Image: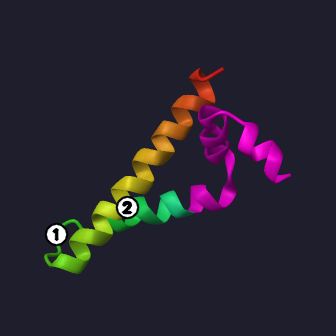
Amino acid sequence: MEDKLMEMPFPELISKLAVAPLYILVVIVAILNVILNRKNKGCFNFFLIMGSWVYICIYLLALYFFFFGK
């Protein structure tokens, strides 16, 4: 199993995230975090919101490769 994953190209690997149920749930929580905590101040909250944006951007990249990467 590991050998097969190591041989897959990066666009094909990341496109599998677009349909992974756990990653979709994480992205939904990240979107809720950005929406609900956008007015809160603080260093810890800033890092949580930046991390949420990273998850959202990775999911958008995965959707791009899922639809247009073939």
The mark tally for this picture is 2
Is 6 within the magenta?
Answer: yes
Compared with 27, 65 (above or below) is above
Name the amino acid type tagged 1.
Lys
**Badge 2 amino acid:** Ser
Task: Say whether residue 8 is left or right of residue 10.
Answer: right
Q: In the current view of this chain or complex, which residue is farthest to the left?
A: 41
Which quadrant: the C terminus?
Answer: top right
Which labelled disc corresponds to residue 21?
Answer: none
Can residue 35 be seen in the rendering of this structure?
no
Label 1, on which residue?
A: 39
Residue range highlighted in magenta: 1-25
Residue 23 located left or right of residue 44: right
Q: Residue at x 24, y 75 (%)?
A: 45
The spot of residue 13 in percent (x, y) is 66, 41
Measure the alpha-carbon separation of dots 1 and 2: 15 Å
Q: Which residue is mark 2?
A: 52
